[in-house]
Amino acid sequence: MHARELEIYGQVLEHSKEPDAQLEALDTWSREFPKTPYADERTALYVQAYASVRPPQPAKVLDLGSQLMSRNLESLFPDPQRGPVLILSVLYSMSMSAWNLPQRTSAQNAAGLAAARELVHYAPTFFASSRRPSNLSTEAWAQARLAIETTAHQTEALLAGRANGPNHPGGRGQLH
């Protein structure tokens, strides 16, 4: 990674709790390094930032997340430490964004549904006992897994209902 690119990447990570500032740093990275071997990670970080900014940008989350999902997240993010975090974040952000997009298009509904289904399958891998951080108890790790899986199943139920037609009873709620 070029020294300037590494500097910008550091700013992106430094602002992970400040999505507006993170988006500014991501935009700088995109402008200064439009073609980079780290473009997929940058896109995943955009997904996180758009999901966290106030107000959230669920359409952008679903659009960018879909671009990543179409290329197989596990092959895009093979790093054993950082990869699983990026994958879980993309899938979770997409699932939550689908809930919070009041007028989903069929493509957005399909993207959210695909993310929720993938999240159901990926959660056991991410939450394997061998991946539990040492500062988290086994119980806390299990509770985090349950929360993620519950969100994924609820999203799947909501969006699958919408996929069955506009009059199906699960199509238009928001998760608060």
Image (cartoon, grey):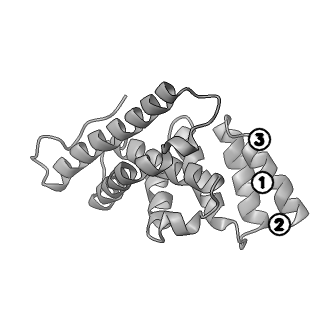
Q: Decide: few, some or many residues near mark 2? Use Cα within 10 Å; few <14, some 14-19, many ≥20.
A: few
**Residue at label 1?**
9
What residue do we see at 86% from left, 67% from top?
2
Q: Which residue is mark 2?
A: 1
Across and down, in percent, residue 65 comes to 48, 58
Among the two numbered marks 2 and 1 on one chain, the one whose residue lies closer to the N terminus = 2
Q: Position of residue 84 (x, y in %)?
A: 56, 53
Q: Residues within 10 Å of mark 3 (few under 14, many from 20)?
A: few
Q: Nearer the viewer, residue 170 or 139?
A: 139
Residue occupying the far right of the picture: 3
Q: Secondary structure at mark 2?
A: loop
- The residue located at (70%, 56%) in the rendering is 27
Q: Which amino acid type corresponds to the residue marked 3 in the rendered image?
A: Glu
For the residue pair 110 and 141, the one nearer the viewer reads as 141
Q: Amino acid at mark 2?
A: Met
Mark number for residue 14?
3
